[in-house]
């Protein structure tokens, strides 16, 4: 029996999700999409799962769409919009909407949709040997999976255009210097560091963190005025969680808070 295209390991407080088609640099076919979405939905339904860690098996993180079945006979007009609608857009929307932090450990090359799936995660760590490639221009496509939205916001319009139009590899170290990712770390410690981060986040006030995710995303298309109202509403919600009460109590008792992430 062949190995599952997505591996899920339950760890204390969080789940490690590994894209697992290493001989194709973990590029996506429909089966891998279905398994990844199922893993995310299942994690979301588990109240003991308070963070996720996403990585890739083998030497790559993800090379985007599996191009093996994208060689068309002359005269055949493909509808790539349909794949985007059915798979990539729901995946990006799910990652952004998950009510828990998602850490991405980019263990090797992240190309095409693979690069933008990494950028959709909340905190991105990359191995020093990893590279980010907006490979789309090389095959006549446009950055998808949120690439045209994430890139200018993360690195500014000039760099976004360069990355998108030249499709040149961006080294992990440069990606960190440009603010595309959180941190570049040595290859040998990547999974360990990313695991520590996910484990730490899993002990934090999960509802507050999920409201923070929502607020930061909403701010991208909001006026200051509307955002101030949102902050009022969502702070009200955060302030009604047991974790807020615990945080304040722990502060005055000069001890580490014991957050539960529950309502
Ligand atoms: O189609 C739709 O539905 C629309 C959605 C589009 C979303 C997208 O992601 S479009 C962009 C698709 N991805 C790419 O264009 C990237 C293609 N890959 C590459 O450019 C290179 O492989 C990398 C730069 C990522 C890595 O280069 P390198 O030299 O380190 O490795 P390699 O030798 O090219 O690849 C290793 C193997 O993986 C190789 O197979 P082989 O020769 O050992 O049998 C290669 O063919 C395979 N591979 C890599 N990427 C893909 C792939 N096979 C299928 N699809 C891939 N995307």
Image (cartoon, grey):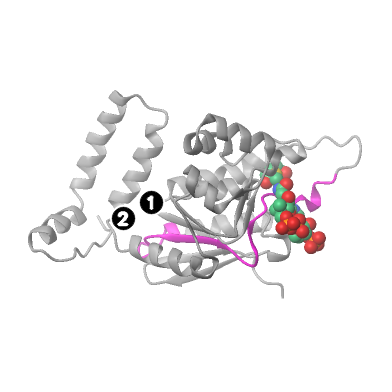
Give the mark nearer the N terminus: 2 vs 1. Answer: 1
- The magenta region covers 43-71
How many dots with numbers?
2
Other-residue count near label 2 (Cα within 10 Å), few / some / many at <14 / 14–19 / ≥20 = many
Residue that numbered label 2 is attached to: 206
Q: Residue furthest left?
A: 252
Q: Reply above or below: 58 against 169.
A: below
Quarter residue 28 falls in: bottom right
Label 1: element kind: loop
45 inside magenta stretch: yes
Q: Reply above or below: 237 against 42.
A: above
Q: Reply above or below: 20 against 179.
A: below
Q: Is residue 172 left or right of residue 219?
A: right
62 inside magenta stretch: yes
Residue that numbered label 1 is attached to: 99
Q: Reply above or below: 94 against 17.
A: above
Q: Position of residue 145 (x, y in %)?
A: 59, 42
- Inspect this view and state whether residue 29 appears: no
Would you say the residues marked 2 and 1 are in contact, meaning their CB atoms lie under 8 Å apart?
A: yes
């Amino acid at each position: 029996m062949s190995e599952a295209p997505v591996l899920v390991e339950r760890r204390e407080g969080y789940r490690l999700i590994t894209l697992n088609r290493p001989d194709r640099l973990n590029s996506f076919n429909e089966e891998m999409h279905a398994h990844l979405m199922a893993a995310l939905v299942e994690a979301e339904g588990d109240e003991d799962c308070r963070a996720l860690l996403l990585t890739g098996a083998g030497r790559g993180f993800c090379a985007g769409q599996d191009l093996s079945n994208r060689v068309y006979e002359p005269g055949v007009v493909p509808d790539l919009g349909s794949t985007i609608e059915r798979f990539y857009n729901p995946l990006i929307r799910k990652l952004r909407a998950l009510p828990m932090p998602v850490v991405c450990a980019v263990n090797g090359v992240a190309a095409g949709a693979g690069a933008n799936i990494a950028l959709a995660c909340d905190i991105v760590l990359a191995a020093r040997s990893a590279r980010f490639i907006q490979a789309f221009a090389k095959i006549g496509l446009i950055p998808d999976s949120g690439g045209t939205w994430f890139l200018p916001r993360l690195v500014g319009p000039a760099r976004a255009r360069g990355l998108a139009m030249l499709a040149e590899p961006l080294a992990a170290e440069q990606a960190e210097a440009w603010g595309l990712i959180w941190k570049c770390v040595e290859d040998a410690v990547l999974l360990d560091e990313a695991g520590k981060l996910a484990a730490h986040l899993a002990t934090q006030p999960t509802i507050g963190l999920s409201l923070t995710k929502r607020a930061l995303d909403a701010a991208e298309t909001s006026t200051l005025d509307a955002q101030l109202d949102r902050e009022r509403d969502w702070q009200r919600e955060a302030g009604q969680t047991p974790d807020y009460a615990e945080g304040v109590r722990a502060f005055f008792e000069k001890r580490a808070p014991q957050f539960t992430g529950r309502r």
